[in-house]
Image (cartoon, rainbow, N blue to C red):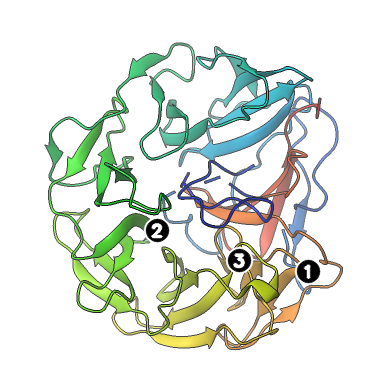
Amino acid sequence: MRWGRGDGKRDGKAVVAAVLGVLGVLALLAGCSGSGSGSGADTTTGADPSASRSAPAPTGVSPPRIPSSTDLPGGPHAVGFASDASGFALLARCGKTRCRQYVAVLDKGADSWRLARSPLADVRGDLGITAGLVVLGPGRALITEGKWPPPDGTWFSGDGGRSWQRGSTAPSGTAAAVPEGGALVPDCSRPDKEGNGCAPSRLLVVHPGTGRFQVLAHQPPLAGVLSPAGETAGGRLFASGADPSTGAAALAVSEDRGRTWRTALIAPFEEYGWGMRVVASGDVLYAVHPGQLPEEEGVKNGLLALHRSADGGRTWEQVWKYHEGVDPLSSLGDPVAAVDGSLTIHGEDAVWRSTDGGRSFTEASGSQGLGGSATVTPLGYLAGDSFGAGSYRISADGVHWHSFELGDGT
C-alpha cells in the first residue's frame, strides 16, 4: 500500500491518507455476491475500463481469483496482497459512538477470508479511522495507526495475523538498500511553517521480516517533500520530490534497490504540484503529476500533467497538461496502464480513458460520478469503490478483471 491524498471527499493538501478502500481511494462496478468462496466473474473491459509499492504481475497473465467474504464484519478500508495471492484487509464497523476495528487474512490458496486477531483498539467519538496497512510478503504485514508520517503506533505480524508484535514509530539505524518484500515510506521529522508539509523530509525502509524502520542510507538527489513514487518491473524504484536548483517537481530512479539514484524527470509544470506517481506497462511508463488547481475548477485532487516514457524511463515527454475546464481535471489513486495501450484515470467526476498515449481522453460510458480508484499491488492493479461498499476488482494487465466483495457493510 502506499500513503496518498485520499479520495474526492478529502482535503487535497493532506500529507497522507490511508486508503484503498489504499494506499485512500475508491467505485467498482459489479462485484460478486454471496459469502465464503465466491470468487467473482471474469470480465474484459472495453469501452468501460472503470474498474505499494510493487510492480504489477507480468502483463497478459490473469491474476488468481480472489474469493469474496461478505460475512466479514463491517466494511473494508484497506486491502493488500502478497505475490502468492495471500492478503490482509482492515475493516471497521461503526455505530453512533464507537468504531470496532477488525483484521481479515486470506491464506494462500484459501477459498475464503478469515478473521484474525486485531491489535487495533476501538475508536470512540468522531475521531475517525486512521489505521493503515502495508503487506510485506506472504503472511507478513505492518499495521500503522495515526496520521502518517510518522504513525502513532505500529504492529507487525509474520504469521498471518495470528499474533502481532508492537513495533517502533521511529527509525533505528540505516539501511543500504530496500530488501525484496520491503517498502519505502516517507518520514517527516517535523512539519513545515505552514503545517502542510515536512521540513526536512526523507525516505525510510520498512524491513519485511520485522516491520522495523531504518533510514535509507543514500537518499534520492531531490529537495522538498520526498515520497515513494512507485516500483516497476525489474525492481526500479522511483521517488518524488523537487529539483534542488529550481524547486520544480522531479523524479529520481534507482535501479539497484535504493543504493544509488539518478534524476529521471524534472517537470516543467511546477505550480502547486504534489508528489508524482509512476505506473508502467512494459517499457512504457507514465508519470502522473497531481496538484492544486484554481478554485473555480472545484476539485480537490487536481491533475496538473502527465509525462510518458517509451524507453523505460530514459527520456520523457509531457503528453498532457492542465487547461481550464478540460477533463480529466482530477486523478485518484494510480492510473491503469493496460497492455492494450490504453491509459485509464479515475477522476472525481468520471472515469477517463486514453488510447493515444495520454494525449487525449474520453469519458467511459456510464462512469459519471466518483469513479473509485486503482492502486498497484504485487498481483496487479487493485481497484475499489469510492464509498467503502467493499466491491473490488483486480487485474494483471489492465484489461481482464476479476471481481470480489468483502464485508457485510454494517
Q: Mark 2 vs mark 1: which is more N-terminal?
A: 1
Query: Which x, y percent locates residue 384?
Result: 68, 48
Q: Residue type at mark 3: give it.
A: Ser
Quarter of the rendering containing residue 154: top left
Circle 3/circle 1 CB separation < 8 Å? no
Q: In the image, 297: left or right of 289?
A: right
Q: Which label number is shown at residue 67?
A: none
Quarter of the rendering containing residue 353: bottom right
Which quadrant of the figure contains the C terminus? top right
The residue labelled by disc 2 is 230
Q: Which residue is at a point 70% across and 34% down the rendered structure image?
A: 67
Q: Which residue is at a point 33% across and 51% down the rendered structure image?
A: 192
Quarter of the rendering containing residue 329: bottom right
Q: Secondary structure at mark 3?
A: loop
Q: Which label number is shown at residue 331?
A: 3
Q: Residues within 10 Å of mark 2 (few under 14, many from 20)?
A: many
Q: Residues within 10 Å of mark 1 (few under 14, many from 20)?
A: some
Q: Residue type at mark 2: give it.
A: Gly
The residue labelled by disc 1 is 48
Labels in figure, total: 3
Q: Nearer the viewer, mark 2 or mark 1?
A: 2
Q: Which residue is at a point 65% across and 86% down the rendered structure image?
A: 324
Q: Which residue is at a point 47% across and 72% down the rendered structure image?
A: 289
Q: Secondary structure at mark 2?
A: strand
Please say if 350 is above or below 231.
below
In depth, the one of 357 and 293 nearer the eye is: 293
Give the Cα distance between marks 2 and 1. 26 Å
User: Looking at this rendering, what residue extends furthest in the front direction?
Assistant: 193
Give the Cα distance between marks 3 and 1. 17 Å
